[in-house]
Amino acid sequence: MCEVLRYYEERAEGRPAALITLNLIVTPEFIRRVQREAPKVQVYAYRVDRGLSPPDVLAKIPGEDWDRERGLNDHDYIVPGAGGLGEVLNNALT
C-alpha cells in the first residue's frame, strides 16, 4: 500500500485531491506505517485487528494506547484475522 501511495505522490501525473485507503481489516502496524510514510492519507477500515495487544490495552478504545497495540504475529499473520477470508477474496483456495 505504501508503495502505491508513494507512486501517486512522486510519479503520477497531476496531484490527487485526496488519498484514502478503504480496507476491510487492518492492524495497528498497518495504520502506523501508513501514517509514518504517507501522513496525508486517510485510512478507513471496517475492523482493526489488535488481538495480540496486552489485556489492559484491549480493554481500551482502539487507538487510546496506540504504541502498545499489536495485531501481527512473528510471521506477519493478522491475529485473530478473518479465518481464511483472504484466500476466498483472492481466489486462492487450493
Image (spheres, rainbow, N blue to C red):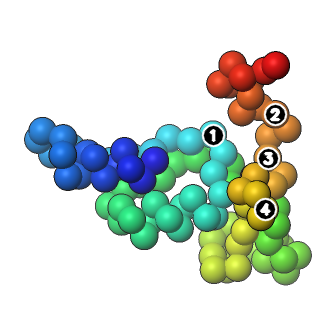
Quadrant hosting residue 30: bottom right
Return the residue nearer the eye: 61 or 55: 55
Q: Which residue is mark 3?
A: 81
Q: Considering the numbered disc 2 on the image, is that residue within a helix, a strand or a loop? A: loop
Return the residue nearer the eye: 65 or 92: 92
Residue 73 is labelled as: 4
- Counting from the top left corner in percent of width and height, residue 13 is at 12, 39
Residue 24 is labelled as: 1
- Counting from the top left corner in percent of width and height, residue 43 is at 48, 53
Whether tag 2 and tag 4 are in contact, CB under 8 A, the answer is no
Q: Mark 4 is on which residue type?
A: Asn
Above-or-below relation of 30 to 57: above
**Sequence-first tag of 4 and 3:** 4
Quadrant hosting residue 68: bottom right
Q: Mark 2 is on which residue type?
A: Gly
Real-space CA distance between mark 1 and mark 3, rounded to the nearest whole angstrom:
11 Å
